[in-house]
Amino acid sequence: MADWIEQLERLSQLHKAGALTDEEFAAQKARVMALAAAPDASRAPEPEPAAPAAAEWDSAAYVADAPRSTAAKWALIGLPVALVLAGAAWFGSTLIGPKSDPGLSGAATAAPLASAAAAASAAPSEEAALPASLDETLTYAAANNCKAAGALEAIYKKLDSAAGLGSANGITVRLDAFDSPLALNVKNGTDADGIETRHAWLRFPEGTTWHGLKLSRLTSTSTLEPESDAGAYEQAMTFLDQPDKVRSTFARLGFGAPRAPGFSELNDQDCKGSMQIVAISGGSALVCSWSC
C-alpha cells in the first residue's frame, strides 16, 4: 500500500478520535494529497544544456563588425555616462565633489538603516508579551503517576499525532491565555541502526508561568525499534528555572520526582515508567518516560 494512502487512513483515524479538528484534518489531507500528486523526481526530465558563456558568443563576428558598430557602441557607452552626469548636476554637492556635507557621510547614510533595525528589534510596550499563568490550564489527574488531564492531555495527544504524521502543518493549540493559536513543531529521524525517533514540541510565549515557574515548552518523544513493537515514550515539561526550584515546586504539588540520576517509578500496569527532574541547558525539565 502506498505511503500516502496509509497517511490518509491514519489521518481519518486521528480525526475520528478527536485528536484533529476539522480544519487540521483538511490541512493535513491537502498536504498528503499534494505529496501524492507530486511528480517522481526519478522521472524528472534531463536538464537543458546551459547557454554558452558570454565570451563564446560569436566573438569573431563582433570584432569584424567593429568598424560598422562604432556609433552603436558610443550610444551604449554615452547614454549611461550622460545619465550619471545629469544626476550629479541635479544633486550637486550633496553627492560628489569636495563640498559634500559631512552630515551625509557613509556613517550618516547608514543611520536610517540602523534606526530601522533598532525599531524592528524594540517591540512597542503595548505589544509586549504579557505574563500568562497556566496554573489552572495544565493539570494532572494523578501527580504520582504523571498522568495528564484536560488541556494538558489534549496537547500531548496533538503532539503525538503531529509526530506520527511527520508534520505539524496546520495543527495548532488554542488556549484562553493567548490571543493567537500556538504552533507545533516536529522533527523525526532514523539512525544508522534503523531506530526511529519522533519528536514534537510546543513552545510557549515569553512570560508564560506555571505555579511560579517560567514555562518554556512541552515535548513528546517516541523511540521505535525496527521490526518490533518495543519502544519508549517520553513527555516533558521544560522550564527556565534551576533544577532545585523545579523539584521543590513539583514536590509541593504532590510529585515525588527527584533530581536525576535519581528517579521515582510510575504505577503503570502496562509499561514500566519513571519520573525525574533533569538539568538541561538554560533550565530544567520534569521528564516522565515509559518503556514497553
Image (cartoon, rainbow, N blue to C red):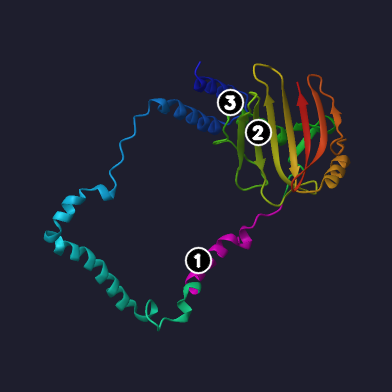
Of labels 2 and 3, earlier in sequence is 3
Amino acid on which the number 2 mark rests in the picture = His
- 217 w.r.t. 19: above or below: below
Q: Are marks 1 and 2 in contact (CB under 8 Å)?
A: no
Q: Earlier in the sequence, mark 1 or mark 2?
A: 1
Residue at 65% across, 33% down: 199
* Mark 2 or mark 3, whichever is nearer to me: 2
**The residue tagged with tag 3: helix, strand or loop?**
helix
In the rendered image, which quarter is residue 80 located in?
Answer: bottom left
Residue 286, given in percent of the width and then of the height, sits at: 79, 38
Residue type at mark 1 is Leu
Q: Quadrant of the C terminus?
A: top right
| Circle 1 residue | 113
Q: CA distance from mark 3 to mark 1?
A: 49 Å
**The magenta stretch spans residue 123:** yes
Can you say whether 238 is above or below 274 in the image? Answer: below
What distance separates the C-alpha of mark 2 from that of mark 3? Answer: 21 Å
Tag on residue 199? 2
State which tag comes first along the sequence, 3 or 1.
3
Q: Which residue is mark 3?
A: 15
Q: Quadrant of residue 288?
A: top right
Residue 93 rendering spot, x and y as whole percentages: 37, 81
Give, as a single range, the part of the protein colored magenta.
108-131
The label nearer to you, 3 versus 1, is: 1
Question: Dot 1: within a 10 Å radius of its alpha carbon, few (fewer than 14), some, or many (20 or more) residues?
Answer: few
Q: Residue furthest bottom?
A: 99
Majority secondary structure in the magenta region: helix
